[in-house]
Image (cartoon, rainbow, N blue to C red):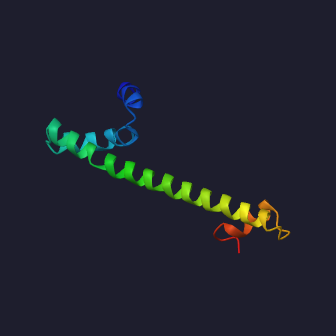
Amino acid sequence: VLLQHHLRPLRLPTFSRAYDKLARPSATGNKDHVQYLLRLREPEPMERERRMIDRRVEAVDDRRLQRLQKLLVSQDLGITPSQACKHALPGNG
C-alpha cells in the first residue's frame, strides 16, 4: 500500500499493477533487486505507447466525425448531426 501511494504521483500505473505479481516469483527464484526492477520496468514503455496510440486514434476519429457533420449541415442534405454520427461510426451501418 505504501509503494502504491508513492507510485501514483510518479504516474507509473503499470508498476502499480505489476510490482506485487513480480515480487513473489523474483523472491522465490533468487533474483536480485536489479533483475526485479528490470522486469518491473519492461512493460511500462509498451503500455505508454499503446495508450498514446489509442489517444491519437480517438482524436483522429473525433476530427473526422466533426468534419463530416459540418459537411452534411453545410450541404443541407436533411441529415441531422446525430444521424451523421450514427452512420459514421463503425458498426452502425
The number of numbered discs placed on residues in the rendered structure image is 0
Q: 26 above or below 75?
A: above
State the residue at coordinates (41%, 54%).
50
Residue situated furthest right in the rendering: 78
Q: 59 above or below 7?
A: below
Q: 42 above or below 9?
A: below
- Towards the viewer: 73 or 22: 73
Residue situated furthest bottom in the rendering: 93
20 sits to left or right of 37:
right
State the residue at coordinates (41%, 26%).
5
16 sits to left or right of 77:
left
Give residue 91's quadrant in the image.
Answer: bottom right
Location of residue 3 in the rendering, given as x and y in whole percent from the top left corner: 35, 28
Residue situated furthest front in the rendering: 74
Quadrant where the image shows the C terminus: bottom right
Location of residue 7 in the rendering, given as x and y in whole percent from the top left corner: 37, 31
- Towards the viewer: 72 or 90: 72
Quadrant where the image shows the N terminus: top left
